[in-house]
Image (cartoon, rainbow, N blue to C red):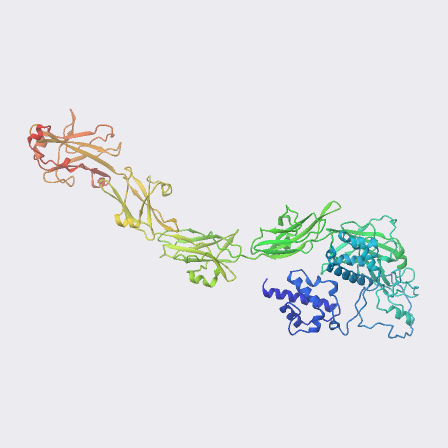
Amino acid sequence: MTIDQKYEARLSALRLWANDVAARGYLAPSENDLAAIAIAKGVDAPGVDVDLVQAWQGAIRTLLKQVAFNIADPHRQLGSEYDRPEGAAAVRASAPPEVTAPGPVRAQPLEYVVEEVDVEVTEQSVPAAQAPAPPTLAERCEELLKNWRRAAVDEGRPFANQIKDRNLRAVANSKRDLEAVQAQLPGFAQDYAQEIVNLLAAVAPPAEMSHSGAPPLPDAAPHPLSAQPSMVPPAVSTGTASVHSEAPAKASTSAMAQQAQPSVAAAATASAPGQAASGVLEVSMFAAYDFMSAETTPGEIKLTRTQDGSRRYAWDPNSDPGDFKIYRIISGDGMVPYNPDQADVIAISTDAAALDPRAFRTAVRHVQVWCNSGRDQTDALNSQPVLHAMLDVVGEVPVVDIREDSGRIIGQWTALPGTEKVQIFRIPAAVAAFAGSDPAYRILAGGTNLGGFVDAEAERGVSYIYKVYTEAAVHNVNRLSAPAVVHMNVSSVLLPVDDLAATVKADDDNETVLVDLNWSIPPGGRVDIYRTATRPAAGIELKAIEEATLEQGGLRPEFRLAHPIEPLDGTASMLNVPWPVEWTRTYFTPVTVLEGRAHVGASTVSTRPTRIRNAKVVERVDSQILTFEWPDGADAVMVYSGAPGQGAEAALTGQPQEISHSGYNQRGGLYFSTLLPAVGCDLHLVPVSYEAGSRVSGTVTTINYPWLLRVSYNVAQRKNRFTGKITGLTVAVQSRMPNAQLPGFVLVYHPERLPLTAADGLHLNMMRDMDGAAPAARVFQPENRAPSDPADVWKTDQPTWDAEVRPGTGYVRLFPAVALEGLKMMAVLDPGVNELSLLSRGNSAWGLLGGR
């Protein structure tokens, strides 16, 4: 609660209290004085009417303390000692006298004759209008008992400080003998019963009352006025009721003066049989209950609540014989009354209704209405009562204190004795008008909750209605009380968003790239999303900061996205956010804002390296090199190999080869560690970048590496054993692709250098090196045999060799005899140049040593 809210709470309570003071006929401090007191938090406020404020200082101080402790309706919780001012400054010059009892009693209307008489009114006949009525005997007894308790507490006597005002009030309204006092005192205070009886015995009743405590009833007047209904208000409803009727018009001056005495126990004027009489009724006036009343079926009592929280009991009027009815409304807390003389008296009324402002002492209050019937008041008082109506009421949980503590809702109370459990309902305020007591909203059902509760499941930032019910057994059946209702606004907490996810919806260089953002909605505040090309300042997310300082961390207002946010089931999304074309990295940062404070959440980065272009495989004699244009924004390129047509998703599960940007620049490409499959494959190139230790992959580029027929061969010289002269060559051809059909080949001879193409020299005539071989031919087609089988060997034709090859000069080389397009699908691996050379390697002695 802010300072302004606390001030408003104090001022509101002071205004309500001032209204009650004015209603009682006293002067209350002015509106300006009340405002000054609310600001100063006490009666020592500057500029106020000192005399008037001092007259109410006790009430004002107690009221402000109750406001400070968040007591509900604090102006209603003041004790009766604060009903009157402490000085004369608060008494109005024209204030009406205090009324201690209501108006007349209902009786049957009669026709009557009024004789005009001259009545001389003296000063003693009518009391001054300004003089308030003196306190009743019960009020004087209650004040005496409070003084006794105060002295006992000061002396440190045991349990004296635990005797409540309601206990003393009940004693004051009882018969005040030992049995009655013991019945009204709690068990721990029973030792004080005799002392209290002796104390009360010394209280002199008002002069108007007889020693017996009952007012004298004079003879009935011949022509009474008809009476009006009456009900004793709460101020005097615990034991007495004033019963009035209009004074007879024909009366003596002395009789009128007697009626006008300002005493609660004023003498009554009796009526004729069957009519009402006026006077003060007390419990002691009723004839003792003899337990001989006829058994009747009691009716129902209807219970309603007044604005100040009092209970109003109403019942159907008694229809038993007798024109005059007196109702005694009694109660028993925790025990059903069995005797109207031995119970708490709520009110004595001639009307079929009564108010009960008393707090519950136990969980169940048993209310009974006993009716005395007779021809007149005297006859009714002396008759035996009958149980007319009854009601069992379960008391609400008293003094419910519910407040928030760091997002947890804490409830505290002390359940009434006899409470079996306390039921608690937490209802969202948005549906409270229709929820009632839906069991779906009940919480903590497994515990008794007799001392309160702790609700850790309340959602931050949500408004709830808490309903608290007393559950108690009434005649072996559990029943609920009316609820104590408390409205709670759970405070919002500033928490960052830590699960922002970005999904790239399109990644085509010719189209706009869109991103969908999703996150969990925090318990309070709004969420702003910022889009930046660089990461926000380091450490900005560690704690909440002022919203105005976000720009210092790199989150400028123009970077905040204005796209609509769509909430759904606790999550929120922002769809179709464009990716700036020139950016290869984009940072999305969530910021929770609440009441001028901001908490930056975890950023998510999306990287978009450009597509890899111009990728190709360059064949070398014994190696293969992958070249391409390096993609912008990529830190490395991963290359995966898969079967042709397999698809990138399946291939990406294999083991890739990786090359960094610096490695590519140094070597000019990616050198495969092993030769690519001869049958062909698909190569999948993935640009990747690294952000905060995690790898972000770009768009996959796939190229096909077609099959390639690799053929190797060996060349051997045939020589004359004696002269060392080369007389021919043998060629053994072997393919690295099993079961592939080999094309035709030509062995090209060039007398001066190594042949460069199939047309660069003379095609030698070749035949298979075996007996019975087919005639020689310029183009020959060897068999493709398995590596474990002997190679298919071909040799030069001797006659043509001698005629076409110059001895000791030139080079030979094997070429496939296929078209130009076919050459792209083949690779012929040459042996060492020494095997291809026909140059002389020595004299004839070499031949003697084994040449042929």
Percent coordinates x, y for residue 598 in the rendering: 48, 59
Q: Is residue 304 above or below residue 26?
A: above
Number of disc labels: 0
Q: Is residue 768 visible?
A: yes
Quarter location, residue 224: bottom right
Q: From the viewer's side, name the closer residue of 767 and 664.
A: 664
Q: Is residue 28 visible?
A: no
Percent coordinates x, y for residue 799 in the rendering: 9, 30
Quadrant position of the N terminus in the picture: bottom right
Percent coordinates x, y for residue 586 in the rendering: 39, 55
Percent coordinates x, y for residue 673 in the rendering: 28, 41
Name the residue furthest front: 155
Q: Is residue 708 left or right of residue 51?
A: left
Q: From the viewer's side, name the closer residue of 161 and 33.
A: 161
Q: Is residue 782 left or right of residue 543?
A: left
Q: Is residue 789 above or below residue 377?
A: above
Q: From the viewer's side, name the closer residue of 214 and 16.
A: 214
Q: From the viewer's side, name the closer residue of 781 and 847.
A: 847
Q: Is residue 68 above or below residue 252?
A: above
Quadrant position of the C terminus in the picture: top left
